[in-house]
Amino acid sequence: MRTRILSVTFVLALSACGSDFPLPADEACTATAGETHIAEADASPSGHSVMLHVVGSTCVVAGDNVLRLVPRKEGMTMHSEFRPQSDTMAAEHPMITGISLTMPSMGHGPAEEPVIDKDAHNTFTAAFQMPGAWRAEVTFYFHDMTDVAQKAVFDFTVH
């Protein structure tokens, strides 16, 4: 009887940490040479649609991740692999000026602040300490609208 009570307590503790978001066996995170769409949002105030990609993986995982903000283009779908096709597309990418990451169900953010790539201004590195539902609030400028700050909020799952 004592063992059973301990195992129930252990399961409840894991569930409280947000680890109840396992991937089905046929959807395991794998490495990829490209990027994978993980979330989409409308930027405010412009209303332009932007997407959040994870680079080099098919999903965001606990640990270090490289994430990229890209404008929505015709034919892009969620959770499909994407490879930038030209330098002109890179010139259209937004320039990130701020990132706030939170795990709403737990009331905290990551242990370390995300770091914006100084060379690729639409890319940042984030370390997620636990799996579960996360939110990214990203402030940025479009290259053709540098006088208007944009904001987009993305909800996604860390596996």
Image (spheres, helix red, strand yellow):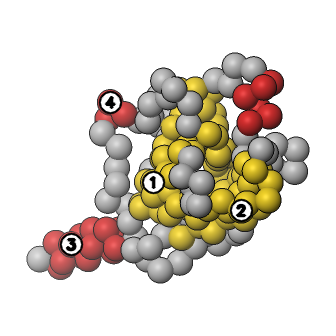
Residue, far top: 85
Marks 4/1 in contact by CB < 8 Å: the verdict is no
Q: Which amino acid does label 2 sit on?
A: Ala
Residue at numbered disc 1: 156
Q: Which amino acid does label 4 sit on?
A: Asp
**Crowd band around label 1 with a 10 angstrom C-alpha radius: few (<14), some (14–19), many (20+):** some
Mark 2 to mark 4 CA distance (whole Å): 40 Å
Residue at image x 16%, y 72%?
Answer: 4
**Crowd band around label 3 with a 10 angstrom C-alpha radius: few (<14), some (14–19), many (20+):** few
Relative vertical location of residue 141 with respect to residue 10 in this rendering, above or below: above
**Crowd band around label 4 with a 10 angstrom C-alpha radius: few (<14), some (14–19), many (20+):** few
Task: Give SS at disc 4.
Answer: helix
Name the front one of labels 3 and 1: 1
Mark 3 to mark 4 CA distance (whole Å): 28 Å
- Residue 84 x %, y %: 68, 25
Q: Can residue 150 be seen in this view?
A: yes
Which mark is on residue 149? 2
